[in-house]
Amino acid sequence: MNRSIFVCLFWILIKPVIAQHTHNSYLKDPVITRQHSLDIIKMKVEVSFEPEKGLVKGKVTHEFTVLQQKVDSVFFDAPGINIKSALLNKSAVKFNIEKTGVWVIPQKPLKWDDKGEIVFEYEASPRKGIYFIGWNIPEPKDKNPFAVRKQIWTQGQGVDNRYWIPMYDEMNDKFITETVTTFDKNYEVLSNGKLMSKKQNKNGTTTWHYAMSHPHAGYLLMLGIGKYATASAKSKSGVALNYWYYPEYADRMEPTYRFTPQMIDFLEAQTGIAYPWESYSQIMVQDFLYGAMENTTATIFGDFFNVDERAYLDRNYVGVNCHEMTHQWFGDFITARDSRDAWLQESFATYFPKQFARVTDGEEEWDWQRRQQQNAAVDAGKKDNYGVRHTSGGTARIYPKGAAVISMLEYVLGSEQWKRVLNFYLKKHAYGNVETNDLQQAIKDKSGINLDWFFDEWIIRGGEPHYKISYQETINTKSEKASDITVEQIHKTDETVHYFKMPVVFEVHYTDGTTDSVYKVIEDAYNVVRIENANNKKIAFVLFDPNSNIIKQVSFKKSYEELREQLEKAPHYIDRYDAVVAMREFDKNQKQDALIASLKREKHSGIINELITQLAVYEETTTIAVLQTLAAHSKAGVRDHLYKNAIPVNSWKPLFENALLDSSYEVTKTVLEKLCNQYPLQALTYLNATAEIYGMNNSVKIKWLELYIQNIKRMNADEKQVVVSDQNKKMTDEAHQKLVAYAGAGYEFRTRLLAFGALKSLNLLNNELAGSLYQAILSTNSRLAGPASDLVNFYALQTDFKNQLIKSYQQNNYPAAEKEILTKQLSWLKNL
């Protein structure tokens, strides 16, 4: 049926929501929008740094308009900042510093609509907001893409720019920013907006002046400083794109930034809004706290996405790149008023990369990503019932569930109508703040459709529907058949989770290849939907919500014959995938032929990997032969999954050996480990073949070192077969030291984490490693500090290692502040 007819029928048939309860109850959210007495119009930040000390020296000028009738004091967020002086309209003004910020107390109260400026001069040594990477660490002698680099970079979200700039640091005030940064002339500086000037100073520094032309929220201000080269490109519409990269590794620039111009073109087409800023730059940094950050005009991302062609196959920047670029519209151009509406930013920035994947990788990849988002929503709903808009809902609500809900909005409204609404919504709130009701109202204003019920159940409330489906064939007195499909909502309901109302498609597929369908609003606990079978055809299978447009759990018991037909004939990929998953419970001999046939037909890695998992238990030559054809599959994830589910024996062994030099680093790592474990006497041969492969974040090399040490241990344990030479012992010690080096501060944090894992597996510790682990615990990067704490506590359970850790701790003579951090993470240190 034509999609537009579907939508029309839905709005003709829809009826007002019948209340399931006599009153409405919601989970209370403690967050409220912060009040402020000044409207900041412009913020100019002038800074220099002493990076070895982690010191910021700054001056910030706030231009403002007074919002309230009478203002006798103004608070600026500035935790831990030493305010040297304050000026109000160029005259000294009284100020009081407290733990979280500074109060400015004018001699006379400020009045409605007064304009003015407040200037602070200050110093700060923050552990949040701005990060000094690598300044007190010697760089490793070996050239390595993941060795430590000297950098300074910022991360303002949620509200961390306040730790290095005295400012009003909330989402609900947007202002124009300027940054003036003076730093060593040998380093490059990036900030928001247009580079207005670059001035060489006589003292060996350069002053970089950037300025925005439109307002944005303060948390989006950024700085990135390091040794970089830049490459430029343009979108079709002429948007200037700047790619910052490490000059020693220029070969990584193109695969890292791949598809960037196409993303701009795509988002402009989808929103109908031209890119709303001066230009767009992206800069990679080391030890970044998250994946990336959408600072206005200048995205920062972790250099763990700085990939070469081989690493691109395993994990690349494309999806994250599109996520952050989407934020230039949803988050920067329009900004949530407070954290309750963060979904208006993050959910859209998770929705659009899925849409872009539809362009680059096809319809089935889009289907797959939708399903992954739906699954994440359901999994979160098994733990609690927070809604997408609730600040306690967690990342699963504002990222994947919110993105899946947006897809359902598109499903309910229709794609073209949804695009019209988005364009209207963005234009109406350009460069402003938004709340959930703004999007809700935009739908009413632009389409004339009231979706209050949708926002109530999918955004404000929590939970997801669980449908129990069954059907039976009926015959009337005229011997005419029909299919009665029963839909029960069996999820737990309470004051905050009700039965769900959604338009659903029902399909009956017949053995002759034809289909009947109906489009029906389901909202009650018990529903029966009838589909007439006028020609008395034989049913092959029945689908509830074909192509999985709705977030849900479904209990729908089907026979093997129905699943086989669905696997073979369902037009939508995700319905065929569901059939394969449902076949897990059936006898392997019953389903073998159907699985093999499906494997020969299907193209997408999601269903292929499920088929591999189920077929890997078969020992028949014909099945093995079909599986082995996947060794040449174009997707690295399929090849890796194949080898993880196979054993390198018999005819598999040569395939494993060939895969040692696979184009994917992950495949190489998988087969190397399995071959060394299966054939220890040949391990050195396999290790020699892969000795020069390092992998992303040194992953292959670290696994190589772990396997090398394990292999020498095996040889020591079996002296009857192999005589261990002094040279081998020396090489083992060198391998151990190399692992310890990778665990040290000379490398970025993902390399260090991989080395932590290898050293734990080998149960190796020395004094150098102990010091590196303590240094990691003191890091401002929680993704490094947490695992380091866990590893130290693991070693501390062993008496000899604990004594070694105590000795290292005492030798280092940590300052009181660092001792406090260490003893908080390592409680056993408190007793020393």
Image (spheres, rainbow, N blue to C red):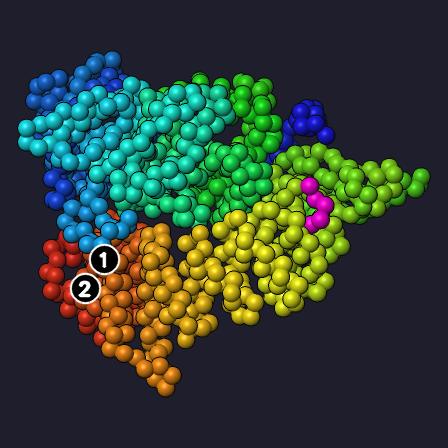
Queried whether the magenta region covers residue 569, the answer comes back as yes
Q: Is residue 35 above or below residue 307?
A: above
Residue 233 lies left or right of residue 205; in this view the side is: right
Q: Is residue 693 above or below residue 230?
A: below
Q: How far is mark 2 from mark 1, CA to CA?
A: 8 Å
Q: Are marks 2 and 1 in contact (CB under 8 Å)?
A: yes
In-front residue for pair 605/482: 605
Q: Amino acid at mark 1?
A: Gly
Residue 635 lies left or right of residue 335; in this view the side is: right
Q: Residues within 10 Å of mark 1 (few under 14, many from 20)?
A: many
Residue 355 place in picture, x, y as percent = 52, 34
| First in residue order: circle 2 vs circle 1 | 1
Q: Amino acid at mark 2?
A: Glu
| Region rendered in magenta | 567-571
Residue 325 place in picture, x, y as percent = 40, 31
Q: Residues within 10 Å of mark 2 (few under 14, many from 20)?
A: some
